[in-house]
Every structure is written in structure tokens, then in C-alpha cells.
């Protein structure tokens, strides 16, 4: 899974962290959690604020 797979990342984060409100997560934790996903295989340096915002929004859309 790559950074560009925003929807899949959001689904996996929602499954991995069901008790977390994605509105309250900071980008440092979000990035670490994405990198820690078992299927994630991309360079952490390829991540930026826009990607993290997109992942957070997709996660919000998934759970709200």
C-alpha cells in the first residue's frame, strides 16, 4: 500500500484504531500509524501535509 491509496489507508486505520476520533489525531501520530500498518510499503519521505490531510478526511468520512 502506498501513500496515494488514501481510502484504503483510512479503512485500515479505522479498523486498527476503532476507539480513536480522527478529528483529534495529530499528523505526527497519523503518519506513524500509517507507516505501522502491516500492508504499508512506501517511503516515509514521500508523505506531506496534503497527503495526511486527505487520509484524515477519508478516515473522518469513514467513521462519521
Image (cartoon, rainbow, N blue to C red):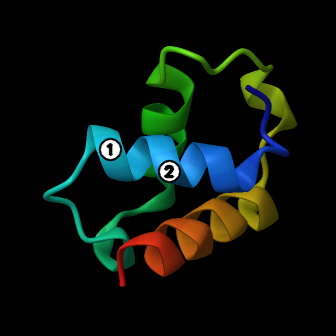
> On the rendered structure, is 19 left or right of 30?
left
Q: Position of residue 10 (x, y in %)?
A: 54, 54
Give the x, y percent position of residue 61: 51, 79
- Label placed on residue 46: none
| Snapshot quadrant of residue 20 | bottom left
Residue sitting at 53 percent across and 36 percent down?
34
Which image quarter: residue 1?
Answer: top right
Q: Secondary structure at mark 1?
A: helix
Label 1 belongs to which residue?
Answer: 15
For the question of whether residue 7 can be seen, the reply is: yes
Judge whether 19 appears above or below 45 on screen: below
Residue 29 appears in view? no
Q: What crowding class fits label 1: few (fewer than 14 Cα within 10 Å), some (14-19), or many (20 or more)?
A: few
Q: CA distance from mark 1 to mark 2?
A: 6 Å
* Picture coordinates of residue 26, whole percent (x, y): 40, 62
Q: Quadrant of the C terminus?
A: bottom left
Does 16 sit left or right of 26 as displayed?
left
Residue where numbered disc 2 is placed:
11
Marks 1 and 2 close (CB-CB < 8 Å): yes
Residue 35 sits in quarter: top right
Q: Secondary structure at mark 2?
A: helix
The answer to whether residue 22 is left or right of residue 20 is right
Please name the residue shown 78% across and 20% down the image.
42
For the point 59% across and 17% down, the residue is 39
Number of marks drawn:
2
Q: Is residue 61 above or below residue 62?
A: below
The residue furthest bottom is: 64
Whole-percent x, y for residue 56 in the image: 54, 67
Amino acid at each position: 500500500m502506498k501513500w496515494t491509496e488514501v481510502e484504503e489507508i483510512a479503512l485500515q486505520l479505522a479498523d486498527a484504531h476503532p476507539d480513536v476520533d480522527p478529528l483529534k489525531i495529530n499528523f505526527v501520530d497519523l503518519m506513524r500509524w500509517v507507516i505501522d500498518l502491516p500492508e504499508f510499503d512506501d517511503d516515509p519521505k514521500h508523505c506531506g501535509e496534503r497527503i495526511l490531510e486527505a487520509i484524515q478526511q477519508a478516515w473522518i468520512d469513514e467513521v462519521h
